Image (cartoon, coloured by chain):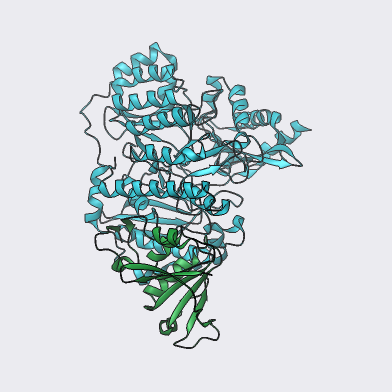
Chain colours: A green, B cyan
Amino acid sequence: MSTTIKRNGDEWQAQAACIVPDWKQPEEWQPGDALLLPVDAEPNPAYRDASLIGIEFPAFTDGRGLSLAVLLRTRVEYSGELRATGAIHEDVLHYMVRCGFDALELPPGRDADTAVRLLAPYSGHYQGSVSQAQENATRVQRWA
Amino acid sequence: MYQYDEFDRQFLNERVAHYRDQTERYLAGNLSEEEFLQLRLRNGLYVQRLAPMLRVAVPYGTLSAVQLRKLAYIARRYDRGYGHLSTRQNMQFNWPELAEVPDILEALASVEMHAIQTSGSCIRNVTTDEFSGAAADEVLDARPYCEVLRQWSTNHPEFEWLPRKFKIAVTGATHDRAAIAVHDIGLRAYHDANGQVVFDVYVGGGLGRTPVIGALIYSGLPEQHLLSYIESIMRVYNRYGRRDNKYKARIKILVRAMSAEGFKAKVEEDWAHIKGGSAQLNPADLEPLQAAFAPPLFEDLDDQQADIEQWRLQHPAFSQWLHHNVVPHKQRGYAAVTLSTKATGVPPGDVSDEQMDAVADWADQYSFGELRISHEQNFVLPHVPRKHLLTLWQQAQEQGLATANAGLLTDMICCPGGDYCSLANAKSIPVAEAIQRRFDDYDYVHDLGELDINISGCMNACGHHHVGNIGILGVDKKGQEFYQISIGGHSGHSGHDAALGQIVGPSFAREEVSDVLATILDVYVEQRIEDESFLSCFQRIGLDPFKERIYVNND
């Protein structure tokens, strides 16, 4: 079974994913639905009204989903849950968090404790990010 | 030089700890080969033909004597007593043990060095002019901007997983010694009419299988917008660059597919959303960096011209070295010195631990404790008082670092090739050595003048063969090593625009390469007008006279 790690205020919690969202594809989607986007989706302003957005990574090395997350958070101003799904693993989660994901669905077989431990390996960052406001105020942001 | 503050030190210590954790999880079987590959690449570790290779970042080619001594220590303690200077101003070690790499990274961190993002599909070490802060033709020292880019691109959350590697080069001089036209992004920094720092932004240059000269997409970008504009370029590339074929994944392919105008439009559409926002670079933030790279406390020195003339008469070899390896400095009484690693019989760019220690000592004695690694794979001492030149030359001779060939035929750029690299189709080091042995007559080489010979062992072009005045490329023909030769390439310095070489024709066996080179040089010597350089001569007479002679002789 897969595990989803979710942000709850300053805390992150792992929970077994018992309930699978009723994902809708961009072609069939309606406001209020859970929307599952491929990494090459364009940031449509209408997505602001989704109840949940998932971005499905075909490989953990595919950075398109990171730029899409940034655009959903900044340009689309989507403020609901943004979930990374697909081929992700514990060593890329910290980048995802900083790009605006607040839920991370680990594939079956990955160790959730390791994943939670590695969510924030760095106490400071050289560049700003969309998650900065949510992060501990003591963290330094060197450049914008 | 830039000195780390508490923030940098803490980040780097956390990075080493993070990589140690990754290595341990890999060795314990909790990370797959494929997963760990991506992580170790981003920490500089390749697995090569014979052993792992660790590429240490030397940001924009500047390092201190203290740092070089640590590299010498690493060469002794973890390697076989030598390191290799790369064309991107880094230092590579060819024999580290995978399990010891976290310890090496810890040793590097103790002198404010690292191997972060020296490989993998991410933003690599930013390179610049090896004579920054010293060159007489410098408009401004680009290193503060290189350091901003180094910091900004380090562990960038959005741009760590690009379609392919990404290289940025910056120049602040009239003569572009950073080869900005053949980088993914090339930046030329200068002052506009109001005295403000601005940048010309080139994108989509590169070598490899598809060599391309970069396109100018923004002329005079104000300093405050440097990071935001680059952020938009990176975002467009990250989103639209091809990921289905690694040979078509570099930004140059995207720029060509969209056209330079189309690419620019896409970048500026994104940029319109962020240029006025928090991504602006503030002069106040730049101040500490400008201060870090302020000129050292130069003394008011005499240029020692009388002494130097005397030394030249006494030591003809010193005179040759002075002519080729010593360049004018912006400060009277000083000079910038190239310590050539291209002695015959030594693989170009290879330096021993003893040589590193010696260079570190000379940097302390003569150059404010600072030195550089050049794109041509040599050491540079940037600020040497001219009164010490004879002593330095004598010391460098003892260490085999005084070959008077900077910029000449025997100062070849050469990748590690088939002797080390698992990508190579052919060896490159033995070709370089054969050429050095064939052309060992100083007077002849000196008479030929400025001549860049660049050798790559495969079409990935780490030896930059496309931009060599004469380029040599190792190719595989039915399991045999052959060499394709091109003429007329140029990386964009000394008043010539960057240009890609033209292939002369069918390739040659390794033992033929030196003869072909000799033929090419004969044609040049016969055809040149007065002191016309090889490149100027080629540009005037074209490829045919060379081609005719090479293949006639070959029949």
- Coordinates of residue B506 in the picture (x, y in percent): 73, 41
Say which quarter of the image contains residue B445: top right
Q: Residue furthest right?
A: B555
* Residue A38, percent from left and from top: 53, 73
Question: A13 and B306: which one is in front?
Answer: A13
Question: Residue at the location (55% across, 84% down)?
Answer: A27
Taking the view exactly as shown, the residue that stands out farthest to the top is: B314
- Give whichever of B15, B114 is nearer the camera: B15
Q: Is residue B272 above or below residue B542?
A: below
Task: Answer with left or right where residue B233 lies relative to residue B51.
Answer: left
- Asked if residue B275 shows in the view, the reply is no
**Residue B7, placed above or below residue A68:** above
The spot of residue B476 in percent (x, y) is 71, 41
Query: Where A44 falls versus B285 (above or below)?
Result: below
Task: Point out the image quarter for the C terminus of chain B.
Answer: top right
Which one is nearer the viewer's eye here, B173 or A41?
A41
B260, above or below B509, in the image:
below
Count how many numbered circles sit on residues in the image: 0
| Residue B120 makes an appearance in the image | yes
Residue B459 coordinates in the image, percent (x, y): 62, 45
Residue at image x 63%, y 30%? Answer: B431
Q: As drawn, is B162 to the left or to the right of B424? A: left
Screen quadrant of the N terminus of chain B: top left
Of residues A45 and B415, the one drawn nearer to the viewer in this rendering: A45
